[in-house]
Amino acid sequence: MAFISFVRYKNTGLVIEIIKILMYNAGNKKFLHNQKENEMSRIESFKKDLEAKKAVKIIAGIDNFDIENIKKVVKSAEMAGASAVDICADAEIVKEIRSMTELPLFVSSIVPEELARAVELGADAIELGNFDVLYKNGTSFSKDEVLALVKRTINLVGEDVFFSVTIPGEISIADQIEMARELETMHVDLIQTEGHFSKEQADGVRGLMERAELTLSNTVELSRNVEMPIMTATGINPTTAPFAFAAGASAIGCGSCINKMTSDLSMVATAKQLVEIANRNAEKIAALV
């Protein structure tokens, strides 16, 4: 009798352990399912803003590895109600920022393998670029070089990940249009324009307009020649943002006007201004429909 009781006890314990394993697996599957749904809802939220022509992406910077500054940029974007944030591809930074925000998270790099790793770490979207900051080091990119990087990235991550590609602002407008059309056939989701990097820039509003002039003209030309949405970046701030939307942009990418600020209050205030400008643009568009 004692032996039978022991066997029963042992079998009961085994059943309990099996049940625990099944419950863990079910919970783990549910967690992964919920994580996937959250990723989808985040990027769908960004897509809706894009469709309404009011998307605002706050850019911490492709070469910004200052985690404290990046956190401040992300918090400012959250408080302002921005559409997304964009950070560098450093793995530890991606993990930390992903854990602190539910905003759609873009990760930027010119290295396809880094973009693929960012997707594994929870990035909702990837951005090949922004090249503008790399011009400071004398780096330049041709149309064919960028397209080769795009193809390699797609081979690594597939076509299900939201993919934005910066079109180099310094190549000819004819090459930009040709490149944009090819990106469209490759099912890239978004193209980002950029302006010209110059160490010599005028002060005040004139300097801001000079910085944004090329990216705005590129936006006009590209919006006339492709159907895919365009994000205007480089020199975009509360002064130049209205011009970007007027030029045909569905989104604006705003970096230095926020990430270079030292005051948290100023960061939030500037981000809110940009979101308000974007919302007004969406209202105008809706009124015309």
Image (cartoon, helix red, strand yellow):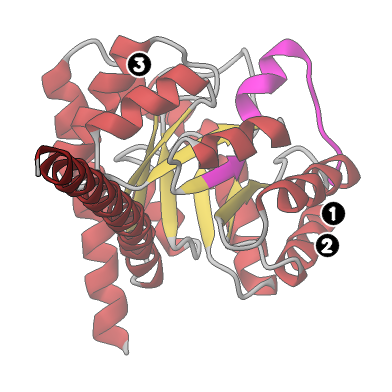
Label 3 crowd (10 A; few <14 / some 14-19 / many >=20): few
C-beta proximity under 8 Å, tags 2 and 1: yes
Mark 1 or 3 closer to N-term?
1
Q: Is residue 197 shown left or right of residue 251?
A: right
Label 3 sits on residue: 260
- Let me know if residue 131 is in the magenta part: yes
Whole-percent x, y for residue 275 in the image: 23, 49
- Let me know if residue 25 is in the magenta part: no
Mark 2 or 3 closer to N-term?
2
Label 2 sits on residue: 178
Looking at the rendered structure, the kind of residue marked 1 is Asp
Along the line of sight, which residue is nearer the eye, 135 or 245? Answer: 135
**In the image, is residue 13 above or below residue 255?**
below
Q: Name the disc covering residue 175, or none.
A: 1
Whole-percent x, y for residue 48 in the image: 34, 69
Label 2 crowd (10 A; few <14 / some 14-19 / many >=20): some
Q: CA distance from mark 2 to mark 1?
A: 5 Å
Label 1 crowd (10 A; few <14 / some 14-19 / many >=20): some
What range of the chain is rendered magenta?
A: 126-143
Q: Secondary structure at mark 3?
A: loop
Query: Residue at image x 64%, y 25%?
Result: 197
**In the image, is residue 283 above or below residue 123?**
below
Q: Is residue 10 shown left or right of residue 207?
A: left
Query: Residue at image x 63%, y 39%?
Result: 116
Specify the quadrant of the image occupied by residue 251: bottom left
Looking at the rendered structure, the kind of residue marked 2 is Glu
Q: CA distance from mark 2 to mark 3?
A: 34 Å
